Amino acid sequence: MRNVLGSWLDGPRSAVNHAREQANDDRPAYRGEKIGLPESGAGSAAPLGKRLLAFVVDLVLAAMITAAFTAPAYPGDWSLLTWLVITVVPVSFFGATPGMALCKIWVARMDSTGMVGPLRAVLRALLTVLVVPAVIWDFNGRSWHDRLTGTLVLRR
């Protein structure tokens, strides 16, 4: 089962190398093992499903808030601005968006136990808008926007 869990970022495998890897597999047993995270429970890497659900909750919340101010017209691109605000401010100071709080996950810094901070939160949100950095993960469960900002998403 471990051979199925890898990421395409781990690199290509040839048929010859695959047999060698079977005998001497140095891949971690679970996501986050290489960076010292527990396998499950609080402090372990947040699963994709919870991250996706939190993102969708935040998008719906942003659309509803924006629609309250733009009704009867559609919110249009103003929803993106609202989403940026409800993402950057809570992540900067509390480590979680409303959707993340609902899903019991949070954003933490890799280098300390301090707040994520506004600069990292803004960069994380802007990279999420680009979509691609947010949907490509490494074996530790960290997406590009997490890696570029020195953060990771954990379970509470």
Image (cartoon, rainbow, N blue to C red):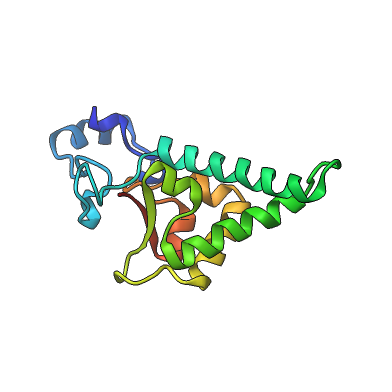
**Where residue 92 appears, x then y in whole percent?**
48, 67
- The number of numbered badges drawn on the structure is 0
Where is residue 58 drawn, in percent x and y?
A: 56, 46
Eyeballing the image, is 128 above or below 114?
A: above
Residue lying at 33% horizontally and 37% vertically, measured from the top left: 6
Q: Residue furthest right?
A: 73
- Left of 133 or right of it: where is 29? left
Give the percent coordinates (x, y) of residue 118. 51, 71
Q: Nearer the viewer, residue 120 or 4?
A: 120
The picture quadrant where one finds residue 25 is top left
Seen in the image, is 42 located left or right of residue 135?
Answer: left
Q: Is residue 152 above or below residue 6?
A: below
Q: Quadrant of residue 87?
A: bottom right
Q: Image point 18% across, 32% down: which residue? A: 22
Residue 52 rendering spot, x and y as whole percentages: 48, 39
The residue positioned farthest toward the left in the image shown = 23
Residue drawn 33% across the image and 45% down it: 139
Identify whether 6 is placed above or below 112.
Answer: above
Q: Residue at x 42, y 35 (%)?
A: 49
Question: Which picture quadrant has residue 86?
Answer: bottom right
